[in-house]
Image: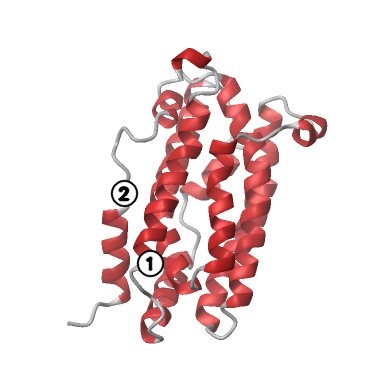
Amino acid sequence: MTVTAAELLDSAVRRLTPEPDANRLVPLVAAGKAPLEAITTLALEQYRIIDSDRRAFLHLAQRAAGEPVISTFFTAMADGEYIAMTRLHGLAAACGLDEAAVRGYRPRAGCQAYPAYLAWLALNAEPANVVLALVANFVAWGDYCGTMSHGLRTHYGFDAKACGFFDFFAQPVAGDGERALSAVQAGLDGGLITDAADQYGQLVLSYELMFWNTLADVSLPPAAR
């Protein structure tokens, strides 16, 4: 029986949905128990991640030039990273960060594993497989961002500008779902999607959780990590 793009995406999302307790930082923010240091570190890490991810998406778009629908998906993703960067400045300001702090920050390996792997995918993986691996993860990422935004408003006094980064990812962008569906369908039609997509998706999820849990450990003494 032929599998449709919608069925393939739904199946991937179900398989790659993290366990409720897998992310240790987001529940702390939701309860107002995470230290501001962890949120500040998140902002600093995101300056590196967004820039890296945008370049990765542009490279994937270039590699997928023979499949315009897939290429368009990645171009739109790169455009989204540009918007996210403009929103990140508000979060950084609310955390008391200036340009010198951003420039002088030394990133943590656990937070940078995700963008490093995305860069690997951009160089080595079939772009159609990357679409499927990433879209499944975006559902969890969006949910996490929505919870972060609510927690920061409720417990930390952050305003709309400070939460704009999280709000951007928490709300579906018009057309994103259709672009993802079309890209997966193009991959199916071209025989480009393989079992490797699931392997990629599992690793993307693992690195996603590594990012959050590295931040959850920011304020803990070494013996407690």
Q: Which residue is depicted at the point 36% across and 73% down?
A: 194
Q: Which residue is mark 2?
A: 17
Write the residue at 58% across / 70% down: 60
User: Residue 146, percent across and down?
Assistant: 44, 41
Hey, what amino acid is under mark 1?
Answer: Ala
- x and y, in percent, of residue 90 in the image: 68, 37
Q: What quarter of the picture does the N terminus occupy?
A: bottom left
Q: Which residue is mark 1?
A: 196
Q: Are marks 1 and 2 in contact (CB under 8 Å)?
A: no
Give the numbered dot on residue 30.
Answer: none
Q: Amino acid at mark 2?
A: Thr
Tag 1 secondary structure: helix
The crowding category of the residue bearing disc 1, from other C-alpha atoms within 10 Å (few below 14, some 14 to 19, many at least 20), is some
Of the pair 218 and 93, the residue shown nearer to us: 218
Q: Is residue 202 above or below residue 89?
A: below
Where disc 2 sits, the SS reads: loop
Question: Is 34 in front, or is 122?
Answer: 122
Figure check: 83 above or below 185:
above
Can the viewer see residue 111?
A: yes
Q: Is residue 209 left or right of residue 100?
A: left
